[in-house]
Amino acid sequence: MTCTVTAFCHTHWIERVFERVSAEEFAALEALSWKVRNELAAAGLPVLAPGINSVLAGGAEVEVDDGADAAGGVFVGWQASPRLQACASRAFGLKQLDEPVLRHSSAVRAAMLQAMAAVLSSAGFSVEDARDEYRPQELRVLAGPPSDQPPFWSLRDDELTLPGWQDAPAGGTD
């Protein structure tokens, strides 16, 4: 799919053609993003619902970029609590760049990204730094676990059997 974006750049209008992945590729990226969300939630991390405003909650944020270029894919970031975000934004806005909250906020994000990368890698995902100037301090998820590997947290057959419940004896008699 192709989309044309028109924008004003300094003194003139520019037009750029933006290529999107196919519907099938987008569906695969969405499926991968939900596997990532589920795995992070299974680890006990709060996971932001897609589209939620970051002033309402903090936690893991999983996004799908549907661009058919090197910047497309599934990305994972960390949003600190709204209070920590507000304190850091205030210090930055007032140009108080030596304020400890800025260093702390950055340390929290780095620690959580490292933890999420470890959780996802342990579960069989292929993860790397996003290496994208528009996505600083984010992870890129390259692939999920093998399709024949169920999540470690999925229900096992023995968990579905009810104690004391038996199949009817052969022949239909008790």
Image (tube, helix red, strand yellow):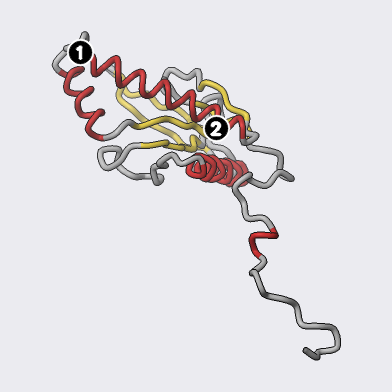
- Cα–Cα span, label 1 and label 2: 31 Å
Kindly indicate whether the residue at mark 2 contacts the one at mark 1 (C-beta within 8 angstroms).
no
Q: Amino acid at mark 1?
A: Glu
Quick check: 58 above or below 31? above
Q: Residue at x 30, y 21 (%)?
A: 105
Q: Is 102 on the left-hand or right-hand side of 2?
A: left
Quick check: 157 above or below 49? below
Q: Is 164 on the left-hand or right-hand side of 136?
A: right
Quick check: 161 above or below 64? below
Q: Is 85 on the left-hand or right-hand side of 16?
A: left
Quick check: 150 above or below 105? below
Where in the figure is residue 90, as x and y percent of width and height?
Answer: 17, 23
Where in the figure is residue 75, as x and y percent of width and height?
Answer: 49, 31
- Disc with the residue nearer the chain's start (1 vs 2): 1
Q: Residue at x 71, y 39 (%)?
A: 146
For label 2, count other residues whose C-alpha is less than 10 Å away and answer few (under 14), some (14-19) or many (20+).
some
* Quarter the N terminus occupies: top right
Q: Amino acid at mark 2?
A: Val
Pick the residue in front: 66 or 151: 151
Q: Residue at x 26, y 42 (%)?
A: 56
What number is the disc on residue 99? 1
Judging by the rendered image, the residue that carries numbered circle 2 is 119
Where in the figure is residue 50, as x and y percent of width and height?
Answer: 41, 45
For label 1, count other residues whose C-alpha is less than 10 Å away and answer few (under 14), some (14-19) or many (20+).
few
Give the structural element (helix, strand or loop) at label 2.
Answer: helix
What number is the disc on residue 34? none
Q: Residue at x 66, y 73 (%)?
A: 164
Q: From this viewpoint, which residue is outermost toward the top?
A: 98
